[in-house]
Image: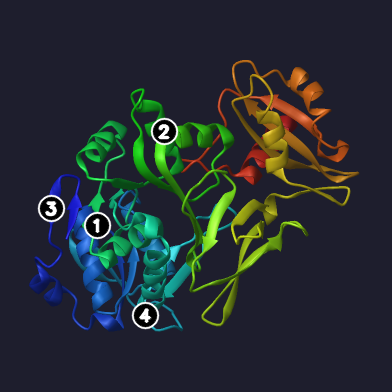
Amino acid sequence: MFVLNETRIDPAEGQGKLRALYRDAHAHRYALHLQDTGDVLRHILFLRDANAGVFPIHPDIPALKAREMARAAGCDTIVTAEGVTSLGDVPDSQPRGGVLVQMSSGTTGAPKVITRTWQQISVEVASYAASFKQAQAMTPVIACPVTHSYGLIAGVLVALHRGHTPVIIDTINPKFILRRLREVTRPLLYTSPAMLHTLALLLPKGENLHAAMTSGTVLSEPWFDSIRASTTHLFQQYGCSETGCIAINPDLRQAADIGYALPHLTVRAGTGVEGPAPIAVQVDGSVIETGDLGFAKADGMLVFVARQDDVIDVAGLNVYPQDVEQAALAQPGVSDAVAFGIDDPLAGGRVALLVAGPQADPATLRQQLQTQLAPYQQPTLIQHVATLPRQANGKINRRDIARSLAVEVDA
């Protein structure tokens, strides 16, 4: 059972129609492009149990684009509100059934097609539920798309595994989300960092969120401070498309502390003594490189340092953007900051810095940073902007910012 907004839904209803719709389901890979969230979950759960291939596509994706994505993902069939449509012969050397298909975020490159077997997901769900004991007595409230692994696997499938009745909210209206949270016993909110930040700003003085999970990006210090002060139990999970959830922090006190590895995984990173190293995950006999840099504390807590692609090489010395950002955010008048690399013909790269805040003055900030950062970390360019170009989930694409800045300078 699950609740959609305010309506209780039994996914077992309509099983006869689904059986008639999906004949020999295990031999097919279906793209689901459905507008109704309840229908999406009914179809996913039925097809999972039938060991079919499933590719959930967000309902806001235009129809033609959805068909292109379905073919690129090796789907031979697409399911819409109008019915089931064959996509014809789709080249795919792998079996079509038995997998959940998703696309990587594309934040650090072109989106990739990721396939994971339902058995692999079942192992992840059991490991997640067993290790994240703090949530056993809480009611999951999922205010993020169930077409994405965060909402579907960590939210819905873990809840059903535990015997919980999850509450799924498919509106982005923060006032509605707050009302539903007040109506649920011990709610644990799964949503984006951006929505958590919005809710923290909307909460009346003296009222806290009972519990919340954040994922997708390490919170900036201003967002972290606001959300931490407004949430009684704050959790964070870290993962990647190829492996699902990798680690969970059961008590988030430092934004970069991304969590303890789930027990079914072996995670390799740097150490607190040696410093950061690439984070890699061993699962099912394969090693997955996450593209992130980090290290493990003595107690096993993983600490995120930077995306490998975001590290700035200044004359052979590594500059981690977060170090520059934290130094900037510590200065009066700076409410948000992002550091990134720009090309330099002599040094290979230099640091650039965008800052926001009504009192953030680049000249003053430059003087302040002289005592806070090493010479090679000093920003060559500091620019004030009204707001930083964050994505809907709160992420920053540093390479896009660098490219757009280069265009502005050239112009």
Classify mark 4: residues with Cα within 10 Å, few (<14), some (14-19) or many (20+): many
Three-letter amino acid code of the residue under disc 2: Ser
Measured as percent of width and height from the top left, residue 190 is found at 36, 49
Check if mark 1's residue and mark 4's residue have beta carbons within 8 Å: no
Q: Is residue 316 left or right of residue 294?
A: right
Alpha carbon separation for disc pair 1 and 4: 20 Å
Q: Mark 1 points at which residue?
A: 34
Q: In this view, does 159 lie to the left or right of 262?
A: left
Element class at badge 1 = loop
Alpha carbon separation for disc pair 2 and 4: 45 Å
Question: Which comes sooner in the sequence, label 3 or label 1?
Answer: 3
Q: Which of marks 2 and 4 is in front?
A: 2
Classify mark 3: residues with Cα within 10 Å, few (<14), some (14-19) or many (20+): some
Three-letter amino acid code of the residue under disc 4: Arg
Q: Mark 4 points at which residue?
A: 96
Q: Mark 3 points at which residue?
A: 8
Question: Which comes sooner in the sequence, label 2 or label 3?
Answer: 3
Q: Is residue 306 visible?
A: yes
Alpha carbon separation for disc pair 3 and 1: 19 Å
Tell me: residue 366, above or below residue 179.
above
